[in-house]
């Protein structure tokens, strides 16, 4: 098993603890790599390196165009290595190779997009209301960014932070999830190969409390960019408040996939399946609540069951597999707990509801695709994020009812609407409290389109031109051009 190292200040080093932990392949339930167990001392070194790099002539003195070119070079390297990186991700987190391959082939676009944006960030000349003064603004990088990422789409979600942060001129300390760190080391090698100056990108691995905690509390971290669970998100936000740090949070959801009786039913059935069973339901945008117009509810359920039953489970590296294992043992147990809770609350289990014991699932942490009907919006299963292949089906009577149920959640990350009516599509997309609304499609994301949550699903936006401003701060510069000092005892 390969024993990995931390990337600090351009050098691959052992953790100060001289301790490593196993990264486990969720399909085989066997360890396959050794990940450094960093601690506060390593955090301090990594932040010091990032701080020094932030002020270094090699980075600070680099023109925005040259910085952009570095990002584009990195994009090319990722494109060349996409297959290898996708295989690492799939082995480490159990998601389908087909899905990770798709992500890895797409990730270079983020670095190209933000690479292109790097030298198009301009200040403004303000036609100021005071005579004899010239006033303009500058957009400046906030400083050292702590990027803390989860296990479900490790490189994709890191890219959403690293690409705009680097384009803005920030430096990074990246802590990937303890469950899926291995691809980060491969990414780190490519940052080096692309020629980023030492200390611009640092990678430290380990556990949330041992590495994440000291990182978010470090006084030299100017900004925290976090994707993870809402409970950890609360903790991160409190640390950001204590240190008065910039922060973006992406915290998952309980997204509604709403099907009206005028929808193309077969398309909507596929959309609901892709919303919850793709990626084994382990996605922040999972359409975990299917709201179905009452006149078509029963027919829709039958069609959905027919399609969901055909889902092929098994080895995520095999092309025919459609549903892979749950990534972590605790997550597997959490998903099974929620299934028990739903049954206890009186929801009707129409499909699955158990660990998968099919021979093709081997020793992996598999849960059968699970569908509950008779779900009442007050049940826990309808309100709490399961993050697994578990769908709650809820009937609704009309648009007003659909809006009420869809918005009756503390989350607000995404929503899907299935209808042929343009009026309904526009009305629903306006009234749904979610950062993303899809109409007649689901689970589409792009580097060009802003992404983020309403309510408890998060703060700030990733992707699109908006995201780069999350890593910039505005300075207003005033220059006297009159040459005669006004009365010094009053405000100018
Ligand atoms: O996430 P955590 P976990 C949800 C999903 C899942 C639940 C728990 O519902 O069941 O979260 O998953 C780091 N200070 N999502 O426990 O803990 C941690 O090391 C600083 C939704 O894996 O949020 C990892 O790098 N950092 C989600 C990162 O936070 C800390 C994706 C995320 O871990 C920390 C994943 C601390 N005190 C899970 N504690 C989404 N939004 O898509 C942990 N971390």
Image: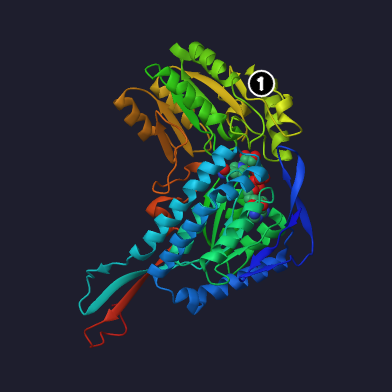
Q: Residue at x 69, y 59 (%)?
A: 211
Q: Residue at x 49, y 29 (%)?
A: 256
The reply to whether residue 399 is in sight is yes
- Residue on which the image places disc 1: 352
- Tell me if residue 401 comes above or below residue 433 in the rendering: above
Q: Residue at x 42, y 65 (%)?
A: 69
Q: Position of residue 438 (x, y in %)?
A: 41, 33
Q: Position of residue 14 (x, y in %)?
A: 74, 66
The reply to whether residue 230 is in sight is no
- Tell me if residue 321 comes above or below residue 299 in the rendering: below
Q: Circle 1: is it few (<14), some (14-19), or many (20+) Cα within 10 Å?
A: some
**Horizontal side, residue 273 vs residue 22: left or right:** left
Q: Position of residue 107 (x, y in %)?
A: 49, 50
**Horizontal side, residue 27 vs residue 483: left or right:** right
| SS state under label 1 | loop
Q: Nearer the viewer, residue 441 or 424?
A: 441
Number of callouts = 1
Q: Is mark 1 within 8 Å of ligand 1?
A: no
**Horizontal side, residue 200 vs residue 262: left or right:** right
**Quarter of the figure with residue 470:** bottom left
């Amino acid at each position: 098993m390969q024993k990995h190292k931390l990337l600090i200040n351009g050098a691959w080093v052992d953790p100060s603890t001289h301790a490593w932990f196993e990264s486990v392949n969720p399909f085989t339930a066997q360890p396959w790599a050794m990940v450094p167990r960093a601690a506060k001392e390593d955090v301090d070194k990594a932040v010091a390196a990032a701080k020094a790099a932030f002020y270094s002539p090699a980075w600070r003195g680099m023109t925005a165009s040259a910085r952009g070119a570095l990002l584009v070079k990195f994009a090319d390297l990722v494109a060349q290595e996409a297959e290898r990186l996708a295989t690492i991700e799939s082995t480490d987190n159990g998601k389908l190779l087909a899905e990770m391959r798709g992500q890895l082939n797409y990730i270079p676009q983020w670095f190209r997009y933000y690479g292109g944006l790097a030298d198009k960030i301009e200040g403004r000349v303000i036609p100021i209301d005071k005579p004899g003064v010239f006033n303009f603004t500058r957009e400046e990088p906030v400083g050292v960014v702590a990027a803390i990422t989860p296990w479900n789409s490790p490189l994709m979600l890191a890219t959403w932070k690293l690409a705009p942060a680097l384009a803005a001129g920030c430096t990074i300390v990246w802590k990937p999830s303890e469950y899926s760190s291995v691809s980060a080391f491969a990414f780190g090698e490519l940052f080096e190969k692309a020629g980023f100056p030492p200390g611009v990108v640092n990678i430290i691995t380990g556990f949330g409390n041992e590495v994440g905690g000291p990182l978010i509390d470090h006084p030299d971290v100017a900004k925290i960019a976090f994707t993870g669970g809402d409970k950890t998100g609360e903790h991160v936000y409190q640390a950001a408040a204590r240190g008065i740090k910039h922060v973006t949070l992406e915290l998952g959801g309980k997204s509604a996939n709403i099907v009206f009786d005028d929808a193309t039913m077969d398309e909507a059935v596929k959309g609901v399946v892709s919303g919850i069973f793709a990626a084994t339901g382990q996605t922040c945008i999972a359409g975990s609540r299917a709201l179905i117009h009452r006149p078509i509810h029963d027919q829709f359920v039958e069609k959905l069951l027919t399609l969901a039953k055909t889902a092929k489970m098994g080895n995520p590296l095999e092309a025919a597999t459609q549903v892979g294992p749950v990534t972590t043992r605790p997550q597997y147990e959490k998903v099974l707990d929620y299934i028990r809770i739903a049954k206890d609350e009186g929801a009707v289990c129409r499909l699955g509801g158990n660990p998968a014991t099919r021979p093709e699932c081997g020793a992996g942490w598999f849960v059968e695709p699970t569908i509950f009907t008779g779900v009442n919006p007050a049940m826990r299963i309808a309100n709490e994020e399961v993050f697994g292949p578990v769908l709650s089906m809820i009937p609704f009577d009309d648009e007003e009812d659909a809006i009420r149920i869809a918005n009756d959640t503390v989350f607000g990350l995404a929503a899907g609407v299935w209808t042929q009516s343009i009026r309904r599509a526009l009305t629903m997309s306006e009234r749904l409290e979610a950062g993303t609304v899809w109409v007649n499609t689901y689970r589409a994301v792009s580097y060009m389109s802003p992404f983020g949550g309403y309510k408890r699903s998060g703060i700030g936006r990733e992707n699109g031109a908006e995201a780069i401003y999350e890593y910039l701060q505005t300075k207003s510069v005033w220059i006297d051009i009159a040459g005669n000092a006004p009365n010094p005892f009053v405000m100018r």
